Image (cartoon, helix red, strand yellow):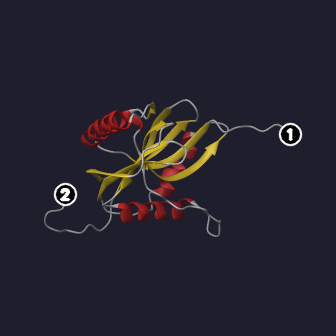
Amino acid sequence: MISVRPTDRLFFAVLPDAEAVEAICSLRRKLSERAGLSGSEVPPEHLHVTLWRVGDYVVPPTAEDVDAIVRQAGTVERPPFRLSFGGAKSLSRGALVLCPGRGSAELEGLSTELRDALTEPGTEVKHALRPHMTLMRSEKLLPERRIGAIGWTVREIVLVHSLLGKATHRVVGRLPLRGRQLSLPGLDF
């Protein structure tokens, strides 16, 4: 039997703002220089935190598919929240990642709500979100270390269409975060 490999993937993610992207790329340079890391870097425009992988496709998803997925995800109600990363480390397969600090509970809750909105009731889902942002892949591994916090206010989630193996990401849907928002002095919302 001939096996057909997927060529396309859809996933929901949060994207860093321009200021955070600049800080992340600067940190990546410093970590690479200090630890002697080399390898393929994630392009700045592809930096993201995956919330939920919708699926892989053997043919590109249609505009109707994308519209239906965005409508389903539109039922999620979460207020904007502050997300920050306070650590960096290599995973076993050589991915250098940022590890979250503040906001990881909100990120996990958002991921869970997306999962619930996008899967049929009763479907067994093996999903344990370990929020992180991949910066690069390197054969040399970096032990976990603390970093100065890098963060931004998450105000929307995006649906990304990725062409597998081609390093191409296109944002095909945007959903602003909304819902009851806490009004506390000193918070950046």
Residue positioned most to the left: 185
Q: Considering only vertical position in the picture, is 70 above or below 18? A: below
Residue 189 position (above or below residue 183): above
| Residue displayed at 50% across by 32% down | 168
User: Given the image, on which type of amino acid does mark 2 rest?
Assistant: Asp
Quarter of the figure with the N terminus: top right
What separation in Å lies between label 2 and label 1 (alpha carbons)? 56 Å
Residue at 30% x, 40% y is 27
35 and 89: which is toward the camera: 35
Q: Which residue is mark 1?
A: 1
Q: Nearer the viewer, residue 131 or 57?
A: 131
Query: Residue 87: horizontal and vertical position, in percent?
Result: 34, 52
SS at badge 2: loop
| 42 relative to 162 in the view: left or right | left
Q: Quadrant of the C terminus?
A: bottom left
Upstream in sequence: badge 2 or badge 1: 1
User: In the orientation shown, which residue stands out farthest toward the right?
Assistant: 1
Q: Amino acid at mark 1?
A: Met
Determine whether the residue tagged by mark 1 lies in a helix, strand or loop: loop
Quadrant of the image occupied by residue 34 = top left
The residue that label 2 is drawn on is 188
Mark 2 and mark 1 residues within 8 Å of each other at the beta carbon = no
Which of the numbered marks, if any, corresponds to residue 53? Answer: none
Q: List x then y, in percent, for residue 21.
A: 30, 39
Label 1 crowd (10 A; few <14 / some 14-19 / many >=20): few
Residue drawn 51% across and 57% down? 72
- Total number of numbered discs in the rendering: 2
